[in-house]
Amino acid sequence: LDQRAEELGVFGYDPRHLTWKQVGPWKVRYSADREAYNQASGKRDIMKVNPSTIPPAYNHRKNYNVFRERGGSGEVLLDLVVEGEHIAIFINKFPSVRYHMLIVPEPEQEHVQSFNELALETIRKLRKLSRSPGLKVGFNPWGGLASINHLHFQANYYEEKMPIEMATRVGVSDGIFQLEDYPARALAFELEDERSRRLFLSFVRLLQQGDIVHPISLIGDTLYVWPAVLKIEEHEFMD
């Protein structure tokens, strides 16, 4: 991915320039170039601009179909058809880490940035398709650092565990866990348990109805969601 992007001149900066940053008790990957982009682009002010998690109407001038037309095939890594569903995978022009991709389900259908059954099935299909346990997928909701109102996910590959994976789990029901030793009150759901997936979607809908920020990630076979993340203006999924 990095080699192809470099050959095509896609990246806004060299994604290999990464360091480690201490965040609480954990060390996380850090890109000074990405942080400079965030500051220059106003990304860190996105929650002030979009204070609600309820996305507005689809923006026909700012979406991944428009980006594709303007950039040609340079930013498109793959066009997949998985079980009849078109899934476009873009190279992230401003990566937080190496191998940082953007996943857009059914881009031609112009879905807004709201997590639903389609979103869950898309990342579930990709998890089954991937042969690497290092695939990590994240969803930033509208009003919670998503700047494009076109249904998409962040994704990358790396083997190190993220802080949320290392948190202690306490079972609250079959296939559902609360996390301890973690700065947000996050819940974990088993991806391949049908009841767990059903309850996960119900929980996400409740958060949407309450207009509560709800970042989501899929790591391995576990779905995580943490409502009203602490210090979300400083940290996002790929941290």
Image (cartoon, grey):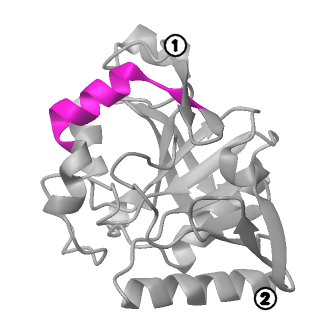
Q: Quadrant of the N terminus?
A: top right
Q: Is residue 216 left or right of residue 175?
A: left
Residue 191 location, x and y as percent? 76, 70
Task: Name the N-terminal-most of marks 1 and 2.
Answer: 1
Q: Marks 1 and 2: CB-CB under 8 Å? A: no
Query: Which residue is at 40% across, 71% downward?
Result: 213
Q: Is residue 86 visible?
A: yes
Q: Is residue 26 left or right of residue 4?
A: right
Query: Which residue is at 80% across, 39% downward?
Result: 132
Residue toward you, 29 or 58: 29
Where disc 1 sits, the SS reads: loop
Q: Which residue is mark 2?
A: 195
Q: Is residue 74 visible?
A: no
Question: Residue 41 is drawn in which quadrant?
Answer: top left
Type of amino acid under label 2: Arg
Q: Is residue 122 highlighted in magenta? A: no
Query: Which residue is at 55% across, 69% downward?
Result: 226
Type of amino acid under label 1: Arg
The Cα–Cα distance between marks 1 and 2, rounded to whole angstroms, is 41 Å
Q: What main secondary structure does the magenta stretch of the protein show?
A: helix
Q: Is residue 41 highlighted in magenta? A: yes
Residue toward you, 79 or 170: 170
Residue 139 location, x and y as percent? 49, 59
Return the mark for residue 16.
Answer: 1
Q: Is residue 42 left or right of residue 151?
A: left
Q: Which residues are magenta?
A: 28-42
